[in-house]
Every structure is written in structure tokens, then in C-alpha cells.
Amino acid sequence: MSVVLFFLLIFSINGAEAQTKVTGIGILIDSNTRIGKEEKVAMEIAAQNYNNHSSTHKVTLHVLDSLRVTTSAEKMIRKKRIKVMIGMHTWPEAALVADLAGQARVPIISFAAPAINLPLMPLRWPFLIQMARNGSQQIKCIADIVRAYNWQRVIAISEDGAYGTDSGMFALLSGALQTVGSEMEYHSVLPPISSVSDPERLVQEELIMLTKKKSRVFVVLHSSLEMATYLFREAKQMGLVGRDSVWIISDSIMNLLDSVNNSVISSMEGALGIKTYDSEKVGNSEYQLFYAQFRKIFRTEYPEEDNSGPGIYALRAYDSIRLVTKAIERMANNTRSSPEMLLDNMLSSNFSGLSGRIHFKAGQLSESPVFRIGVVGKRYKEIDLWTPDFGFSMSPFVDKCEEKNCHGNFFYTAKTLFIPERNQTGWEMPTDSKPLKIGVPGGTTFKTFVKVEYGEKPN
């Protein structure tokens, strides 16, 4: 009797194993960067959580270095026989992999998006799903900030080859500034930090050149955290961060500042920052559980990192795995499946993820983003929220308290946000220009008409 039970147990186990389906997911990220580390840990947590609760289906992750995108993608498609590919941080990378994936009929979930989404994109890349929004909405937010201050000229700075870098972003910003009565005086493109032997000297030379321009409004569109650290450290030493200059930092950098030490934050202190507003994690029990899991694993795997908390990149990576597993669950009762069926189930998803609402239209996230506008400092001081449809929630920067009422280091008026002891004009006399000298009498009888006072700066 015991022998019979033993063989029945073996057959039942083998039968259960035969019924368990495994879906391979290819991951293309740079796990040497902070973003890549967060994404890797987050996706592993999502996969493990699903595998622990699913008895009929499992997912397995194949992580490869994204430095050789085309080779890595081909290797995973042919040798690993993956069903879905996730990753890519720049649009050129995503476009290359989307071409390969389309030929192999493998759905691809991209963490990058172009500056603008063209109408024919779904036809050219039918298997592409964008888990990132294009830059047009954030550009509009930057232009609204410039309009609120009435700045006439802006200097844009970007690192070539950095996360999300797209030449179209400069064209978008230039057009958006024109619509608000401003203009881009100059755009500075820094080479990738990996290709520079002496980034400190490079940044110094670039900043010296920028001081010869009139504008003192600097917009950092895209940059790696390493290059941004050099940029602000040198700018502060040269006196370009502070009283007479204004810096606007995009969300690609701001979303990483929670992971850096205080010395980096201090060099950026006073800059205006734009951060993605992830409202879904507020009071979310799933987020609290994920947060605890993430911190524990991240601390263990990457003890050299200053901060072990997850950022928006980790939340987005976690949601990308959930996007796949939810599609798999909807296909559980189908006896036959195909890449097109998996793709359609992912594109028809509609759920609350940790990074926001996950719902797609024409292959891209359909929900409009909400941006938090704040001031960089030891604590991020939020000023306002901005949405593409309604602009600033206080129309724009309208008196949060009473007119000209102080709120922290800022004063609100009915139309403009004023920074005390800052250059509100947004421009400065170029360093290589010849100053205009005006002679005035040093002493007069009628001080009502002429009075000489010396400021902090030499005239």
C-alpha cells in the first residue's frame, strides 16, 4: 500500500510540474547605475511575489547588460526564448530593440520615450509599449515656470547620451519658450561622462563660456546624476548657484536626489526642481509592503549606496512586471496563446500601479502626469502642482496664503513667485562685455534729487 502511495505522489508532483508554465522575461538595464540597481531589485521583488502566489504559472527574469543593446537583445530572443523584453533608458536604444522585437514578434516594454509621439509609431513598432511619457508635457511645465517669472532668455543644458536624451527636446523647449514670450539664448550639450577623462575641467570650461551669455536662467534637461553633480558643484564654486542665477532641474535628475548625500544637495540648494508626483503610493498598503521588501534587499545587495529607499524608477519597474503577470493571468483559461494575444492583454490593462495609473492608448501611457514644483534643499519644499490640462494648481503660483505673504523662503503674489534676494530679471551683464560708466556727483546739497549708495557688487 505504501509503495502505491509513493508512486501516486511522484506522478502527482510530475503532473503539477508539467502543468506549471514558465514565461521568460528579458531585462535590459545598466545595473551599475543607481537607476539600474533600483529597477533590478524592484523587478525581482515583483517576480518573486507573483511566483509565490501562482501555482500554475511562473516568471523568470534574464538580466543582461544594456551597454550592448542590439547584441544583448538578439541573444535573449534567440537563446533564452523570452516572451517579453523590458528596459532601455534612451529612445535610440528603445527604437533599435523595438525593430528587433517586431521582427521576432516579442512585446517590448520600454522605459524611454521620444520627445514627441508621432501618429505612425504604432504601425512602425507594433510590439512596443512605452512605460515612460514623452517629454512634451514637462517642457510645457518648464515654459509655464519661465512665463510665471517673466524671464526673457533661457540657457538649456543637457548631457549627450544621458537617460532620455533626445535632440528633439531642445526644439520642443525652444518652441514652448516662444509661445510664452521667451527664447533659448543657448543650448549646451555636454559629452557623456563615460567618455570624459577630466569631467571637472570640462564643466569648468563650459560654465566659463556660459558666463559670457546674458541669461542667468539655466534649465538642466537631461543628465546623468554623476554629470549633474559635477555641474552644480563647479557652478556653485563659480558663484552661479545662488543669488543672481536661477536653475530649473528636470524630473530625470530630481527623481534621483533622494538617493544622494547632503553634499550633492547643498550644491543644488535653491534650484527649482520638477518631480513626478506618485500619488498612488500615499496610504497604499501594497506600497508599504514593497517599500519594506525593497529596503531590506537593496541594503544587502548594495551597501555602498547612501539611501536604500525606492524612487519612481523602482516603482515603474515593479509595475512593468505586474503588467506582464496580469496579462498572463487573463490568458490562463486560453488553451492557445500567441505573442499578439499577450501584447493585446498588456495594452488593455487598466490598474492602479505604484507609479500611477497603468492604462495605454496607442502604445503609451494615457494618463496625464502630475508634476511637483519645489525648491531643492535639505528638505524638498513643494511650491505647487502642475498638470498639462490645468497648469499650476494655484493658477500659477497664486497667493497660497495672503498677497505677499511669506511661505518659507518664498513670497507669493497674485501673479508671480518671488525668490527673496534673487535676480528676478533672469539675466546678468556678460563677463566679457564693456560696462557702461556713468558719472554722478559724489556730494550734493539736495539729497532728494541725487543720493549715492553703494551695493554689494562693484559698479
Image (cartoon, rainbow, N blue to C red):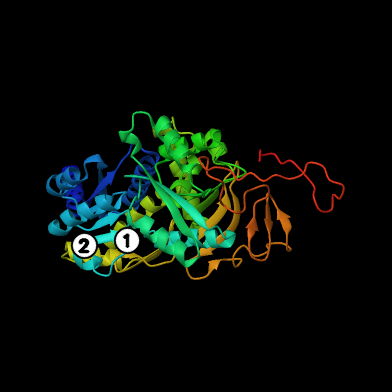
Q: Position of residue 151 (x, y in %)?
A: 55, 57
- At label 2, the amino acid type is Trp
Is residue 284 something that shows in the picture? no
Q: Is residue 67 left or right of residue 286?
A: left
Q: Relative to residue 153, is residue 294 depicted above or below? A: above
**Mark number for residue 125?**
2
Q: Residue at x 28, y 56 (%)?
A: 109
Asked whether disc 1 touches disc 2, contact meaning CB atoms under 8 Å apart, the reply is no
Q: Is residue 270 left or right of residue 252?
A: right
- At label 1, the amino acid type is Lys
Q: Residue at x 74, y 58 (%)?
A: 405
Q: Position of residue 293 (x, y in %)?
A: 44, 43
Circle 1 sits on which residue? Answer: 326
Label 1 vs 2, first from the N-terminus? 2
Q: Relative to residue 347, is residue 216 depicted above or below? A: above
**Could you classify mark 1 by the number of other residues whose Cα lies within 10 Å: few (under 14), some (14-19), or many (20 or more)?**
some
Residue lying farthest right? 445
State which mark lies toward you, 1 or 2.
Answer: 2
Foreground of the two, 390 or 425: 425
Q: Position of residue 306 (x, y in %)?
A: 49, 34
CA gap, disc 1 and disc 2: 23 Å
